[in-house]
Image: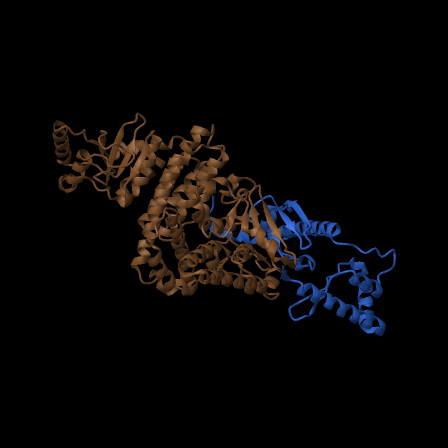
Chain colours: A blue, B brown
Amino acid sequence: MLPDFLTLKIELAKEQAYAITHSRSGEPLLSQIANYLHHEGRGFILRREDGSEEKLDYRPMSGGIEIDLKDIQQKGEVAIDEALRPANKEINEAQRKALFETLNRTVPSLDAGGRPLSAELILEMWESMDFSFDEAGTWQRPTMVINPIQAPRVRKELARLESEQSLVRRFEELLAQKKRDWDDREANRKLVD
Amino acid sequence: MIEKLIENWLINVHELGYTIPFCEVLISRGYTIVKISRQGRGELGKDVIARSLEGELHTFQLKGPADINLPEWQRIQNEVRDLVQLPVIDPAVNRVEPHAPFLVTNGEIVGDALTSIEEYANDWVRRGYPRLQIWRKHDLLPMFVESHGSYLPTALVDFREFVQLYVSEFEDRIPREQFALFLQRLVTVDAVTGRGRNAKRAIESLVLIAGYILEQYERAENHVSALEGWTVVATVILHVASRDNLRRRQYGQSLNLVWMAFYRSLEQLEAECLNRDHFIESRYLTAERDDIRGARTMLTLGWLAAKFFIDKQVNSYESSRSVSTIVKREHKALRFLGESDWPYIMALSLFLERTEGASAGEGLIKAWVRGIVMMNRGKDSAGIPSPYWLQEKVLALANGKLAVYEQERFAGQSYTIQSALDMLVRRLLRQAVTHFWPAASRLTFADYLPSKPAEWFLWRGYNGYMRLDNPPRLVSWSSWRQTVNQIPRKSVPEILIENSQWLLPFALTYPHRVTRELSGTIDAIFGERADLV
C-alpha cells in the first residue's frame, strides 16, 4: 500500500459520521428537538407525566453512501462531501417521518372540518393546547409545521392576529388565561400528604 | 507468542505480585486454598497453604523474582526451615497433620545454592521432617500456561487488546470499559462451550490473565485502578455465574482469590492515605487543576468510605477515626463533575452519617440534589454528564479536550436525582424534598434496566430498556415514603446481594449500573434505612 495517515483519517471519519447523523441544517423542526444518546439496551420505556407508559424498541435509521473513486480523482474532496449529503437527508427524512408518526399517535388533533386556514382557526387550535412559558414568564411560542404552499396564507393570517383589534384582544385574553393555567400547573409541582 | 508474554510477566513479578495468580494456578490443578498469608508475611514460613486433589496438605513459600544464589539462600534459610519444620497453625487444620513443603521461586536457583538447599533438605528428612520440594521458573511457566487451557486470548483482536492492556501506562487510570470488554470476550457463550466445568476453567484463566495486567497497577501503587480492575474481574465472574447458573463451588474459590487481591489493594490505599498529608500528585504539577484534584479526591474518599462499610461487615471498626480525619481534611477539594460521582457521594454520605452524625451525611445528599438542579436551570443549561461518562471523560470535556463527535446533550435529564431524593425521603427530610421538588420534577429521571441478572454484570447491555420517567407534578409524601422504604429484593441480582461485600465496589466501578433500586439496596444494607423485601 501507499503511505496512509490512518489515525487522522479515523478521527475525520468519526467527525463526518457525526455530521451525517446529527446535522439538522435546513431542518427547522428537527433542529428544535433535543437529542439524547442512549448508551445501551434495545429500547426505552417512557413514562409520561400523566402516568401513561410506552415501551418502544430502537429502530435503525440509515442512509446509503456511494462514492466513486473516479469522482474523487476528478473533483477532489468535494466528491466526498457531495456523496455524504444525501445520506444526511435520508436520515433526516426518516427522523421526520418517525416524528410525525409519534405526534399523530400521541398528540390530540383538531379537525378543522374543511375550513381554510385562518387566524380564527389558529386561535382555536391554540385554545386546545397547553402553553409553555420560560422562567421569566415569556411565552414559548409553539412551532407551526405547514406545507410550504400554505406559507403565504399563514403569514397573512398571523399578521391579522397582530393587527385586527378583535383578534388581538382575543389572543391577549387567551394568552392571559394560558399563563394562569401554566402558573396553576407549575404551582402544582409540590409534595402533598 | 502469548506464552512469551506470560514468561515476561512471570520473571519480572515480585513474590507478593504473583501470590494470587499462583493460587489460581493451584486451583486449576485441583487444589483447594486453605490460607494465604496477608501482605506476604508468611506465617511460620508459609505464604500459601492448600490441599491437593488427593487431600494432602501442601505449604508454599514464594520467592522472586531475583535468582536465589548462595548469599540469598543463607538470608532466607530460617524462613525455609520454619516452612519445613513448623506445623500448620490454622483453625481448619489439625496441627499434627503432616504437610508437604514447597519452596517456589519465579527465578532460578544458581551456583552452589542448589547443592546447599538439597543438603539441608536431606538433613531435615533424616531428622524426621517432610522433604522440601522446589518449584522454579521453568517448573512454574508450564503450570501457568497449562492453567489457561484453551482460554488464552488467541484471536488476533483479543491478543492485540491484551498486549495493549499489558503495556499500558500503569500510573494512569485503568481503562475500565476496555478492560471489562476484553475480559467479557474471554468468557462469551461461544468461548465457554459446554458450561459447567469449562466455565470454571474459563474463570480460572480469566483471573490469571487479569492478574498479569492488574499486578502492574499494583506494582505502580495505583491502588484505585487496581481496585477497579479487580472489581471488573469479580463482575465478569458474577456474569458467567449468573449466565450459566453455576454452583458456588465452580466459581467461589476464584471469586475469593479476587477478593483477597482486591482487599489487599484497599488496605494499601488506606495506608497510603493515612501516610500522606495531602492529595496532590506532583507529576506534571502545572496541570494539577482543581477539577483533577477534585476527581481524585472523590474517587479516593469514595473508596475509603467503601472500606469502612466492608470492614464493618466483618466487625472491624479500627480505621473509621483515622479515615474520618482524612475525609474532614480533604472534603473541601471535592468537585461534582458528573453523575458517575453518585455512588461515591452515596458511600461518603453514608460514612459521614455513621461517623459524624446524620446532618453531615444529609448535607452531602442535599448538595448533590442542589447541584443537579442548578446545572439544569435555564434554557441554555448544560445539564450534568450522565453516569456513562466516567471521571476521565468528564475531565476531558471540562478541559476542552474532547472531540465534538463525542459530546452529548445532558440538560433536562438526570440518572441520579431520584435516587438522591429517595435517600432524603428515607431520612424524613420533607422540607428539603418540598424545596427541591418543583425544579427536580421538571427533569426526566433516567436509568437502565438490564433484561436478566447476567446482563447487570456486562459493561454494556443489549437487551434491557432505558427507563425514562417524567414524574407527575404533584406527589404524595406518604406514598413516596412507602415506596422507598421497601426495596424489592428481586430488583437487584440475587447473586450480588449474596456477595454483598462486592456491592459498593460494583457501584463505584460501574456507576451506570446504579439504578434507583440499586441505590435503595445500598441504602438498605449499609445505611439501614430501608428493608429488602
State the residue at coordinates (23%, 30%): B99
State the residue at coordinates (13%, 29%): B122
Name the side, left or right, on which B182 lies relative to B171.
Answer: right
Compared to residue A119, the image places residue A24 above or below, namely: above
Query: x and y percent of residue A150 in the render?
Result: 81, 60
State the residue at coordinates (79%, 70%): A173
Query: x and y percent of residue B444 in the render?
Result: 61, 56
Closer to the camera in the image, A118 or B253: B253
Name the side, left or right, on which B86 lies relative to A9.
Answer: left
Query: x and y percent of residue B6 in the render?
Result: 33, 38
Residue B260 visible at all = yes
State the residue at coordinates (33%, 57%): B273
Query: x and y percent of residue B323 in the render?
Result: 35, 57
Compared to residue B35, the image places residue B439 above or below, namely: below
Name the side, left or right, on which B39 lies relative to B476.
Answer: left
Label count reads: 0
